[in-house]
Each structure stands twice: as C-alpha cells, then as structure tokens.
Image (cartoon, rainbow, N blue to C red):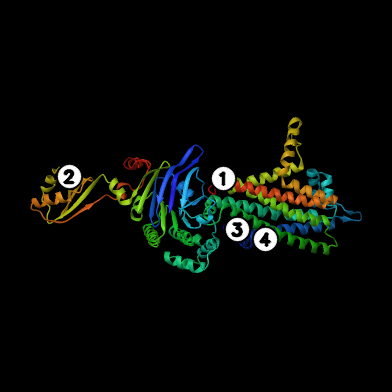
Amino acid sequence: MIQTKNLTKRYGKFTAVDGVNLNIPAGEIYGFLGPNGAGKTSTIMMLLGIVKPTSGEIRLFDETYTPKRLDLRRRIGMVPEKHPTGMWTWMTAGEYLQMFADLFGLEDSGRRIDHLLEQVGLAEVKNKKFAEFSRGMLQKLSIVRALLHDPDILFLDEPISGLDPFGVKQIRDLILEENREGRTIFISSHILSEMEKLCHRVAIIFGGKLMVEDQMKSMLNTLAKDREIHVDLEELPADLLGKVKALNFVQDATGEEKTLVVKVPKTGDYRKELSKYLIDQNLVPLSIQEKSLSLEEAFVTITKENINLFAGIGGEK
Amino acid sequence: MNQRAHATTVLARRRIFETLISPGFYVAQTIGLVLAYFLVAGFVRAIDSSGFDYQLYPAYELIGRSLVGAFGTTFVEKLFSEGPFLFILYIAFLPVLLYLAVSSVFRFGLEKKVGALELLTYGPADSTSYFLAALIKDILMTAIYLVVLLVFLLVAGVLNNLILGPSFYYSLIILFFLSVAIYAYGIFASSLTDNSASAIAVFLGLILFFIIIMMGSFTIVSGYVRNLASVFAWIIKWISPLFYWDLALRFVEVGDWGMYFIGILLLLVLSMAILIISHLTMKARGVRP
C-alpha cells in the first residue's frame, strides 16, 4: 500500500532523508520511530505530497505518487502533532469539521460528523468553540477531521505526545479500532512504550537513514540483552539462589518471596533445564514463565545517545 | 469540477463569509465613504464664481500641493479636470484596497506560520487553491465596494448638482483591474515569506517602490547615480501595475479606447504572470514555514 524506493530529501547540503525504502502492506499499523530531527517528519511530508523528494520514488495504492496526485492524496488522512493555534477560533467543533467535509465534497457530511464525534466521545461538545478544548480533545478532533473522508491510510505524527494517561488510552483505543476496520495506520513517534502496544511492525530512522525495520516481537527479542525466567515455588530455600547461580546457563538469580527470577542468555530456551534441575532438588515449580524485556524497559524513548545500539543490532537497511 | 477547482470554491466561499461577518471590511468601507463625504462637501465649498479652486478649501489645498509636489501640475489638473469625483474615487477606494490586500497578506502569513495552511493541504486543497480563494474573495469584495462607492457618489452628485464625468467611469473600471494586480502582488509577497510581519513588509515595500518609480523622484541622488536610477526605473516600471494604470488613463485622455483596453489587458497579463510566479515560488518553498 505504501512503498518507497531510495526516497531521499536534501535541503542544501543537509540530507534529511537518505535512501529510505519502505514497504507497508494494507491493514498494518506501522510505527516509524526515531529521535527528533531523525527525518521522520520529512519522510511523512513526502508521503503526504507536501514536500517533493529530491530523488527516489513513492508508490501509494500501487500507483506512482507525486504532489500533483490530489486524487491519491484524498485517500490519505493526516493527524499532525499539534493542532494549529490561533486559527478558526470562532468556529465550533461542528463548523470546523463541516469546513473540511465541504473541502472533500462529502455527501451526508452531517451524519458522518455526528457518528465520528460520537465515536471519540466529543458529541456533546459539537457546538462548543474548539478554542476552549483541551490538548486531548483537540487531538481527538484532529483524528475525526482526518477520518471524515474515510481514508485508506491514516498518518499520525506523535499522536499521544503531551496527553495525560486517560487521553493516551482513548487515542490508543481509537487507533486500534480504526485498524480493526481495515485502515492502514502509519504512526510516527519517539515514545517506544506506546509503539509496543500499537504497532505490528516498526522501523527506526536516524540521521535520515532507516536503521532497522522489523516485526515488533522480533525487535523486542533482538533488543533484549537477556531473558528472565520466573518460577513460582511452594517455598524458596535459602541456599537455592547460590546453587542456581552456579548453573552454567544462568547469568544471575534473585528471589522475590516465593518466586525465583533467573536471568539466562537470550540465545536459548532454558525453561526445561531449569525445571528439571528444580525437580532434582525436590522442589515443585508451580508455574514457570519466560518474561522478555519490554521495549519501554529497554528504551523509554529513543535518544541520539542510544540509537547506535539499534544500529548495531539491525544493521542498515 | 476537478479537485482544485472544488477546493478553491469552498475556500473562497468560506473566506467571503468570514469577511462579511467580521467588522474590518465595514470599518474600511465606512472610512472610505466618510472621506468621500467630506471631500464632496469640501469641493462644494471650494467653488466660487470662477469655478473650482482647490486652494479655497484647506484640505484640498493641502492635498493639491502634495500631489503637485509628488506628481506634477499636469497630473493634478487632469485629476480635477472633470470635477472632484475622480480624485474622491481614488481616495475613498484606498482604505478598502489596503484593508483587503494587507488582511489577506497578514492571514496568509499567519496561517502558514501556525500550520493551518499545511492542515488544509492535507486534504484535497493545495497552496494554489488556497491563494486563488483569497484572490477571488478580494476581487468580489472590491467589486461590491466599488458598486457601493459608485452609488454613494451618484447620490452625492445628484444632491450637489454635480455629475460624474466619463473619466470617472473609465477610471472605476481600470481601478478594479489595478486592484487585482495589487492583490496578486500581495500573494507574491506572501509566497516569498514565512510570517505575517515580513509578508506585509515586503508587500508594502513593493507598492512603495512602484509609487516612487511612478513619481520618478530621484532628486535625492545626483549625477551618475541618478542616471542609473532612471535606467533602472525604466526597466522596473514594466512590472509595476501603476504603470499600466497610468498608461490606460492616458489613453482615456486622448480617447483611444482600443489602447485603453490594451492597458487593461496588460494589467491582467501582469496579474497572471505574478500569480504564476507565486504558484511556482510556493511549490518550491512548500507550505511549511
């Protein structure tokens, strides 16, 4: 659905996007991650047809896409990071949405606006001036605006940035619901924890280059330096930790009440060996679970300092 | 209707509605009409047994002296040859022309700076439909005001036993096309800049520059520099809408209607060229500040 080939954007001598290749199938939630200034917005602007690429090709819906293709652009919805402030302040939420519905030439736009406002929980404030809206409400209004014309692809730039936890959950649920309805979602963000909850696949861009692109689960496995096995026991003998630490596949072991937490290399599954050893020690494992590190635990946010870790594991695309 | 034409129509409708519900347009019109009222009243007072003498009314004397100083005696005599209405037309039109042009330039800069223009272009609108909508709004508002002004001056003429001469009507038409060219320059100034303040500065700077060239006032320089400035002014005048306006009025004076319409046509060609350059500039610079 979205394909780019050697997509490049240069501003003078500065290369904002450097030969990026993307291939995003329909129905996917694709996370586009990177620190500020990595080239995320430039890439999105090119995909939206707002900025012309210096070189490379963009294909949308299996057709070559250029800024002139307004017909293809109307199949895209875009939610920018921030809603423009100080403009259209005299408008109510309904009037604001109606303006965009008119631009798209939508039929029966009133019903569509009501339906979408209902969906995001803004139906009651339809006739209120949106200048009075909170950041979360504006973000939801922005999503409604982007969905008005029922686009096939929805782009979201930092959709949860600056929202409170309740707002984050509402926006997340909304994105997931839109995806369930078949919409392809492209999210740009630097907040990994949210991407982990939302995305099927993620790509990391840094210095304009695509450093790594993978399924979320594979990336998490790759990122994790080791694995943790959590074993619930009937009792935790005092000398057990020392014995477990001595096992050749164990890197570390700790105890939390009746739970034994064992760190093992990520290269293998050691649950069977550990379980066998504990039984040999006349202990009964009540449950045994492997817990991989979350992306959030690994990196709360991608920063310029830790991006090299990604580059090291993924290699350049 | 294609996407761009549809977006232009919707945006223009919205702009016209916003202009009609905001006080600015009415304030500018009121200023123009109040000025027209006082100038008509002053003119009546400045008539004696030998006819109109602008020196008999202090305001006219001040304006007359300024105009003579800036544009020469011939220009002023031409201006008042058919009575006061030609002069009043220009003066009363100026507030609305400035309001429409500057407010469009201001808004363009503001919408670009805060990202509103970018938001519009996420949909089926593009920067071209955006500035065409602004131009349509300005043209329509100008036409409305010119009709209002015409009616006002016709009534004032009837009440004071004065008539609006043929030059007035020809000037009224050319004024309309002159304003189109000035709005096009407003769009051009907006396309070059990223915020309202710099856009307005560029726009007013351009207009001032054209006025200086029209006045041909290079008295502050002398010798070689003055000659150079004159050559420069001769080249630049071809891109000045005031040049074509002046040209058309000269043809009105000699009764050459064919050339008068060519003057109008040239104003339209200039406006179109400026719009095309603005479109290309915007395409190259994008909608982001």
Question: Which dot marks residue B5?
Answer: 3
* Mark 1 vs mark 4, CA separation in Å: 36 Å
* Residue lying at 32% horizontally and 51% vertically, measured from the top left: A216
Question: Which amino acid, mark 4?
Answer: Tyr
Question: Which amino acid, mark 3?
Answer: Ala
What is the secondary structure assignment of the residue under circle 1?
helix
Q: Which residue is mark 2?
A: A250
Question: Which dot marks residue B26?
Answer: 4
In this rendering, which labeled residue sits more in front, label 4 or label 2?
2
Query: Where is residue A148 drawn, in percent x and y?
Result: 48, 62
Question: Which amino acid, mark 1?
Answer: Ala
Q: Are marks 2 and 1 on the same chain?
A: no
N-term-proximal mark, 1 vs 4: 4
Residue lying at the far front in this picture: please name it.
A62
Foreground residue, A226 or A56?
Answer: A56
What is the secondary structure assignment of the residue under circle 2?
loop
